[in-house]
Amino acid sequence: MLIELRIRDYAVIHDLRAEFGPGLVALTGETGAGKSIIVGALSLLLGERASSDTVRVGAARARIEAVFDVRQLPDVRRRAEELGVDDPDGLLILRREVAREGRSRAWVNGSPSTAGQVGELGRALVDLHGQHEHQALTGRDAQREILDAFAGAGSVVGEVEDAWRARAALRDEREERAVRLREIEGRRDFLEFQLEELAGAAVEEGEDERLRAELDRLEHLDDLLQGSHGLSELLYAGEDSLSDRLRAARDELAKLARMDAELGGHGTLLDEAYHRL
């Protein structure tokens, strides 16, 4: 039960504190008196999207706080306990602030919380009904809840939900395994194709080393051509080429060999070198 509502710097409200007793409480007033603003502030506390436009002009932040008596609401107290909220007096105090910059903060019984958690607890405590609220009865969820309540099936609703989730999990797992199986089959087909390609290529032992050597040679083809040309210039081109020098040395050694027979063997080496060039 809502026992107190405090609103500060929200819309046109500077500071408001309203206490509610048991039974029916009605807020009355002429159009424009601010009734809808109070409902809007309560909606913000129940998780409505925060906006800096709700902060009163000239104020730094808007603050909405509500005090609820939850002593007769065990489900709410249990959920609060799951969220780590302590309520030794059976009171639940929800508070939310919206800064001028749009930043929002929330508390439950003085402990920092999230707007989602505050909204979850608040919606379990407050139902807001507008003039078109009856349209919610056309929704599937609402109709299902009404049908379950009429059939007295409330005790098995949780079991049905658990069974449905288990079935959905099994379905997802089956689909995931089917996807993995298709991937494995595709991989198998690809590997079989590669094996057939390798078999058709008739690859010989050591062929990869030869191909790498050939690739290395082709990658350095320009350097090899330039080096070969330079070497040819040294060996054969010009009057001072290496072949000319060998021929001259051979002829000179032949003259010396006629005077010293022991030098004839060296002439043979020069002849071989010359002819190899």
Image (tube, rainbow, N blue to C red):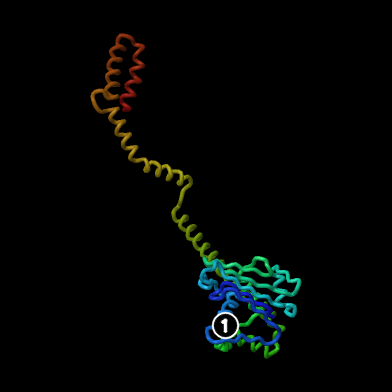
Question: Dividing the image into 4 quarters, which one contains the C terminus?
Answer: top left
Side of 173 relative to 265 (left or right): right
The residue tagged 1 is: 35
Task: Report the residue at 46% width, 50% height from top.
Answer: 203
Above or below, 116 relative to 253: below
Q: State the residue lying farthest toward the top.
A: 259
Of the pair 8 and 249, the residue shown nearer to us: 8
Side of 123 relative to 248 (left or right): right
Of the pair 274 and 49, the residue shown nearer to us: 49
Q: Position of residue 6 (x, y in %)?
A: 63, 75
Side of 108 relative to 213 (left or right): right
Above or below, 275 relative to 78: above
Task: Report the residue at 31% width, 26% height from top.
Answer: 275
Of the pair 39 and 274, the residue shown nearer to us: 39
Q: Position of residue 100 (x, y in %)?
A: 53, 67
Of the pair 80 and 275, the residue shown nearer to us: 80
Task: Please say whether residue 173 is visible from this viewpoint.
Answer: no
Three-letter code for the amino acid on which mark 1 is drawn: Lys
Q: Counting other residues with Cα less than 10 Å from the Cα at mark 1, is it few (<14), some (14-19), or many (20 or more)? A: few
Q: Position of residue 197 (x, y in %)?
A: 45, 57
Place residue 152 in its image quadrant. Answer: bottom right
Q: State the residue lying farthest toward the bottom.
A: 150
Instruction: Report how many numbered discs are placed on residues in the image.
Output: 1
Question: Dividing the image into 4 quarters, which one contains the N terminus?
Answer: bottom right
Place residue 245 in its image quadrant. Answer: top left
Q: State the residue lying farthest toward the right.
A: 88
Task: Please say whether residue 71 is visible from this viewpoint.
Answer: yes
